[in-house]
Image (cartoon, rainbow, N blue to C red):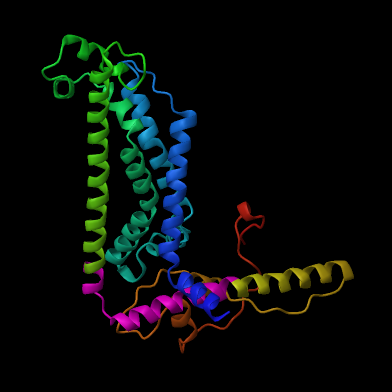
Amino acid sequence: MDNFQLVLRFFMNQKAMVGYSFMAILTIGGERVFSMVSFQCPCNHDQNFTYGLTFLLGPAAVLLVFGLFFSTRLWRLYTGCCLNPMKLCPRGNCFGCFRVLMSIFTSACVAPIMWLCVALLNGTFYECAISGLDENLVVDLFCKNKTLKCREELARVPCDRSKLSSDERMELLLMFRAQSQILGWSIIIFAAIIGLLGTCCKNCRSQVSYLQLSFWKHYIEKEKERFDAFTVDYATKLAERNLQSFFENKIPNPMPFPNHKAWEEISEYYTFSRTEQYYSTLQRYVERTDRDFSPEKRPVLDIEHGIEMT
């Protein structure tokens, strides 16, 4: 039992690594499915480049959109900013807002980069795309010191319909695959270097020590877990109170709510500072001496959520 708890604790402490590993496995599986089931290179000069590039970049673009769409940090920063643009830059900290947006975009780029790397290392999509280019530079690169038939049959090389000899076709395929894999490894190396430099720069400019930074990350994680559990519990109690009042036809028991201003303040994106010994906007709000304790008389939601604003 102790060994099981030790293993479980290890995986809980390495959630990011486990998540990225699981994402990599899904990316590899998805790429193999695309390659074997849906991808069929047309093998002609007019469509090869567009078709191959679509399969190479299309899923990456979709993964980027999904990464942004499912980012809670993005919606926390963006929600309501059309009505109140200052929410993007609370307290005039535009640089902090830009840094948060860059962090959100960087996190969303992980899955697309994984897709590009896996697809390029496999080489199927790149072979189709590069064989359809009619640029003299590309054609001269692959058909250098070869017959004119090489130029004419280059687009058919990814298929079995090429009129070239098997040795010439295999040589061209190996050149395509080598270029694709070199490009894939270049992206991996570049992303790793950028990630290392970004982490070094972030930690170097940190206003707090490594241990305090670790404590802050643990606190944010635990606060989010408890906030989600508490809101579910509180919403359940409110729903039960309202249903009981409706079916029993009686006045509901009073139930306190934070006011609209309080929700706005704790929804701001918080950046740790040595001048404030707080670890989140929630802690900063509850420890304020001039805190407004007046409850919200009724929920303030827009018509999209079923209740008109008043």
Q: Is residue 248 above or below residue 26?
A: below
Q: Is residue 141 left or right of residue 122?
A: left
Q: Is residue 93 above or below residue 292?
A: above
The percent position of residue 143, horizontal first and vertical second, equals 16, 19
Q: Can see residue 176?
A: yes
Q: Is residue 3 above or below residue 243?
A: below
Q: Is residue 140 left or right of residue 40?
A: left
Query: Principal SS element in the magenta part?
Result: helix
In the image, farthest residue toward the bottom:
289
Q: Which residue is rendered at x = 37% and y = 62% of the image?
A: 88
Query: Which quarter of the figure has residue 10?
Result: bottom left
In the image, farthest residue toward the front:
167
Q: Which residue is rendered at x = 22% and y = 29% of the image?
A: 175
Q: Which residue is rendered at x = 39% and y = 23% of the image?
A: 41
Q: Nearer the viewer, residue 256 or 112?
A: 112
The percent position of residue 6, horizontal first and vertical second, equals 49, 77
Q: Is residue 275 left or right of residue 227?
A: left
Q: Quadrant of the C terminus?
A: bottom right
Q: Let me know if residue 202 is in the magenta part.
A: yes
Q: Nearer the viewer, residue 193 or 68?
A: 193
Q: Can see residue 265?
A: no
What segment carries the magenta color? Answer: 201-228
In the image, farthest residue toward the right:
248
Q: Which residue is rendered at x = 24% and y = 20% of the image?
A: 167
The percent position of residue 308, horizontal first and vertical second, equals 64, 57
Q: Let me know if residue 71 is in the magenta part.
A: no
The percent position of residue 148, horizontal first and vertical second, equals 17, 10
